[in-house]
Image (spheres, coloured by chain):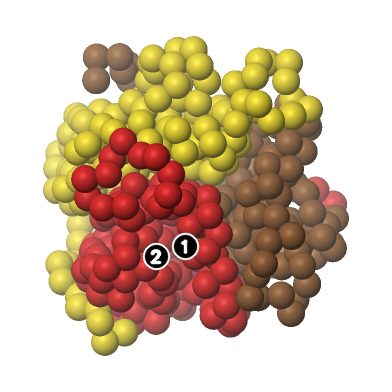
Chain colours: A red, B yellow, C brown
């Protein structure tokens, strides 16, 4: 792969430990809730150093995604695109929970249930313009539970 | 993130170990095979405590997804939705392996090849209504191989 | 799950360590760049044994996917399918960065930002016909940064 250059490699030989946690997220109905700062804060409060964080959403009508955090129109357009791919008007067998429920399951399958992100110095190793979002696919507000796992070194 | 409450945080300082494994899954043709109990059993047989499990499917015409385990119509509707997004009738260059093969690759790309799930007390930290599924995208039954990795504490 | 047989289980009790890294990938414009050999080389140069590698792309208009590495037409058809699901012709609010930017964000959301893959003997535990790809969704070539984390045993 001649077009590839390595940089930033580093050994991390300190003893590894892990931490489990959960976050509760209150969504405001269909749309995106930025949890990037919440994840960084959880890492900070737990003294995380270098390692890997895994985030899992414990629901199937809401999901996770990593998206641009600069222009909020990106998130609106993405929401519209998901609604075109999983329209409420389609004929679904599963309809008892309301016309927005089956589209919500489809949108969840098309995006992410779990994300794993390297952590450097207690911060998510994301690009400058990336944020981590809980995506609410139901029309109404919900309380969503996210499961967290950090593995790595700890400052304290 | 004022709308976020933490709960369930806990330190897990016991020595960390890992285990690699594989599962073979026989699918019955296009559709969903629930492997949640199989994953919990693999964790149990290996004495897993707290940690993180990663599941990777070693094929590109079948995939993984986390979906609702309550109403089986959700899975049928999701299968139909994927078939609308990746129809057999479309014009594909790659057609030698049959009309269901290229749609299977597209459906695999739209869902998941790997999933990482926090583990608490030897159990997947999923929500009540979540199951982990192998999704067969080919019409005929296949034998599918799943690669497993657990990192964490062990009971024995 | 009577249709499941286990094989290949093995304890790995050597001391666990981790390594962080990054790869820079030069893309040639819209399309797929195979980084499988680059990941295996990074593992080899770092003396990785058994464990888990996580790959995260640090952009939201390019993404990752695991796909067939045998017939290149699969990748062409997959690219076409993504363009049908996120067409340039649709009406987007976010248009200042060019007609290919918002479709690129949607395609990124539909594929993968992060992938975790078990590693055996320093090699990705993929199936024979699987490759790991950076997918460039913008029309022009870009330099893309990928964040890497390996956890496991080391040979040296």
Local packing at callout 1 (Cα closer than 10 Å; few below 14, some 14-19, many 20+) is: many
- Label annotation for residue A65: 1
In this picture, residue A52 sits left or right of residue A27: right
The image quadrant of residue C30 is bottom right
Callout 2 crowding tier (Cα within 10 Å): few <14, some 14–19, many ≥20: many
Query: Could you give the CA–CA distance between mark 1 and mark 2, rounded to whole angstroms?
Result: 7 Å
Residue A33, above or below C7:
below
What is the secondary structure assignment of the residue under circle 2?
strand
Q: Earlier in the sequence, mark 1 or mark 2?
A: 1
1 or 2: mark nearer the eye: 2
For disc 2, the chain is: A
Same chain letter for marks 1 and 2: yes
**Quarter placement of the C terminus of chain A:** bottom left
Q: Is residue A73 visible?
A: yes
- Depth check: C156 or B107 in front? B107
Q: Is residue A24 left or right of residue B62?
A: left
Q: Which mark is residue A135?
A: 2
A89 relative to B15 in the view: left or right = right
- Above or below, A108 against C98 in this view is above
Marker disc for residue A104: none
Image spot of residue A54 (x, y percent)? 37, 59
Dot 1: chain letter: A
* Picture coordinates of residue B73, whole percent (x, y): 29, 33
- Measuring from the top left, give residue C38's x and y in whole percent: 71, 47
Residue at image point 25% right, 28% down: B38
Marks 1 and 2 in Cβ contact (< 8 Å): yes
């Amino acid at each position: 792969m001649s077009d590839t250059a390595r940089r930033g490699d580093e050994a991390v030989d300190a003893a590894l430990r892990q931490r489990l946690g959960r976050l509760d997220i209150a969504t405001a109905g269909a749309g995106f809730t930025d949890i990037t700062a919440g994840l960084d804060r959880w890492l900070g409060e737990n003294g995380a150093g270098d390692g890997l964080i895994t985030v899992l959403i414990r629901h199937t009508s809401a999901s996770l995604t990593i998206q641009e955090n600069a222009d909020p129109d990106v998130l609106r357009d993405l929401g519209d695109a998901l609604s075109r791919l999983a329209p409420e008007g389609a004929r679904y067998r599963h309809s008892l929970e309301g016309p927005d429920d089956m589209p919500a399951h489809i949108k969840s399958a098309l995006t992410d249930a779990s994300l794993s992100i390297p952590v450097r110095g207690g911060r998510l190793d994301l690009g400058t313009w990336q944020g981590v979002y809980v995506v609410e696919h139901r029309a109404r507000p919900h309380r969503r539970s996210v499961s967290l796992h950090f593995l790595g070194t700890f400052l304290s």
